[in-house]
Amino acid sequence: MERSAATQAPGLVVVGDYAWDVLIRTNSPLQTGGDVFGEVQLAPGGSAANTAVWAQRCGLQTRFVGKIGNDPFGQLAVEELAAEGLAADWVRSEAHLTGSVAVWIDQEGERSMVSGKGADHYLLPSELPLATLRSAAYLHLHGWSFFGDPPRSAARRAAAIARQAGARVSFDPGSFQMISQLGVDAFLAATTDLGADAIFPNLEEGQVLSGEREPGAIGARLAELYGGALVALKLDASGCYVYERGQGAYFEAAPARLVDSTGAGDSFAGAFLAAWRRGASAAEAARLANRVSAWVVERVGARPHPDAALAELLGGFTG
């Protein structure tokens, strides 16, 4: 176990995937058997790592737990999170390469992904950092940890350890296509007993898991399935719908020009958790999360380099 230093106990621990995104963006449709010009860029990613970075950027002391290969991309991962000021517990694998994802971004800014099975898919319960999990005030997990085993058993064990130590838990379902492939009943069986206090599905994931179509009905059904958890339903350009303690409300999206939707949902979850864990109401957390995700989609990659516009957006919130 490779452990980076932290200056204080984390307000949030995120366990899950770290991967490198190979972003491919074209200005015209792909030509079968032919060539087109475009942009090809390597960018840090992994849904769990994205959420951890955004929670840290939004002012919540966060720690990441993940598995990487003993390869150059693994070393780059260590250096990249260190540059973010994000503490981490790294498990190194000799048998698997660091995760990578091919992301094609079309002319409309929508993305399609091909995820390789890297080291992040092979995290074992025996490799979990017990001290980190027992010190966590809050644990966040991602659906990509539940679509196969490993790492499903490790994610479930992490939740059990953290809950036993008094932590709260949240998770993001991750992918409606993968949920459908695994089977809705199997996914629910693996996640509804986590004791989640909050879940962060997008509309398609909410529809698949709940069997409902409209946000209000989705929120009510998911809250029922997940033991009264807060449901923050991500609605892309329509903002979000938050269902909490039997009441639901819409929150409008911040204005944005879509360039790349990669990581928008992860940034939403990270920003929401940062605000919520620091005492903001669910409504205040939703408004911040909408603003942060709008900033993200106007740029390429899941966690673009912070700029003056982001600093102004966050204002005094991170102080």
Image (cartoon, rainbow, N blue to C red):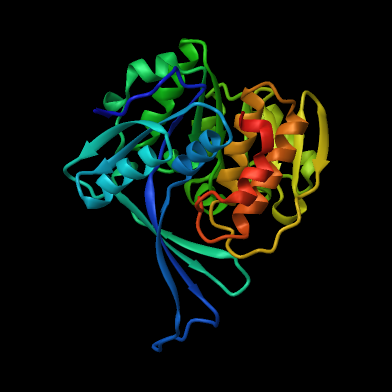
| Rendering coords of residue 217 (x, y %) | 79, 39
* Observer able to see residue 195: yes
Location of residue 2 by image quarter: top left
Q: Residue furthest bottom?
A: 34
| Rendering coords of residue 155 (x, y %) | 41, 30
Residue at 67% across / 33% down in the picture? 316
| Rendering coords of residue 249 (x, y %) | 83, 37
Location of residue 95 by image quarter: top left
Q: Quadrant of the C terminus?
A: top right
Left or right: 207 in relation to 106: right
Closer to the camera, 258 or 187?
Answer: 258
Decide: is 296 above or below 281. below
| Rendering coords of residue 31 (x, y %) | 46, 86
Q: Residue furthest left?
A: 94
Residue at 65% across / 30% down in the picture? 275
Q: Quadrant of the N terminus?
A: top left
Decide: is 312 above or below 131. below
Left or right: 94 in relation to 155: left
Closer to the camera, 281 or 232?
Answer: 281
* Observer able to see residue 206: no
Closer to the camera, 50 or 17?
Answer: 50
Left or right: 178 in relation to 95: right
Q: Residue furthest front?
A: 308
